[in-house]
Amino acid sequence: MVRNVGGIDRILRIVVGLVLLGLTYFGVIGWWGLVGIVPLGTALMGFCPLYRLFGASTCPAGGKRA
């Protein structure tokens, strides 16, 4: 897999994922908040399957292997 999630994108994904999971944990939102696992996972892996599907990348030119 070639990395396609860049620095700022990664940080935003981590924040969104943790916020959703935190809100779920504290009962502010329902179980659907577990969807926060997706942005958190893609940020940690540095790879987003949807970016690959659409040919997008937020990495600097010549993304590294994940």
Image (spheres, grey):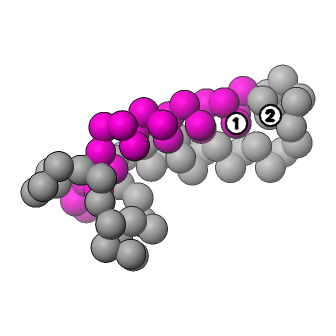
Q: CA distance from mark 2 to mark 1?
A: 6 Å
At x 22%, y 59%, the residue is: 2
Up the image or down, 28 lies above or below 52; here it is above
Q: Is residue 2 left or right of residue 44?
A: left
Q: Can you tell which quarter of the image residue 21 is in?
A: top right
| Residue type (three-letter) at the residue carrying disc 1 | Leu
| Residue 2 inside the magenta-drawn segment | yes
Tell me the element at label 2. Answer: helix
The spot of residue 63 in percent (x, y) is: 16, 54
Closer-to-camera residue (32/15): 15
Up the image or down, 8 lies above or below 42; here it is above
Quadrant in the picture for the N terminus: bottom left
The spot of residue 38 in percent (x, y) is: 57, 50
Q: Is residue 48 left or right of residue 58?
A: right
Q: Is residue 3 left or right of residue 13?
A: left
Q: Can you tell which quarter of the image residue 34 is in?
A: top right
Up the image or down, 62 lies above or below 18; here it is below
Q: Main secondary structure of the magenta part?
A: helix
Up the image or down, 1 lies above or below 44; here it is below
Residue at image mark 2? 24
Q: Is residue 66 visible?
A: no
Marks 2 and 1 close (CB-CB < 8 Å): yes
Tell me the element at label 1. Answer: helix
Residue at image mark 1? 20
Question: Which portion, as a residue range, is magenta?
Answer: 1-22
| Residue type (three-letter) at the residue carrying disc 2 | Thr
The spot of residue 18 in percent (x, y) is: 61, 30
Q: Is residue 28 visible?
A: yes
At x 31%, y 73%, the residue is: 55
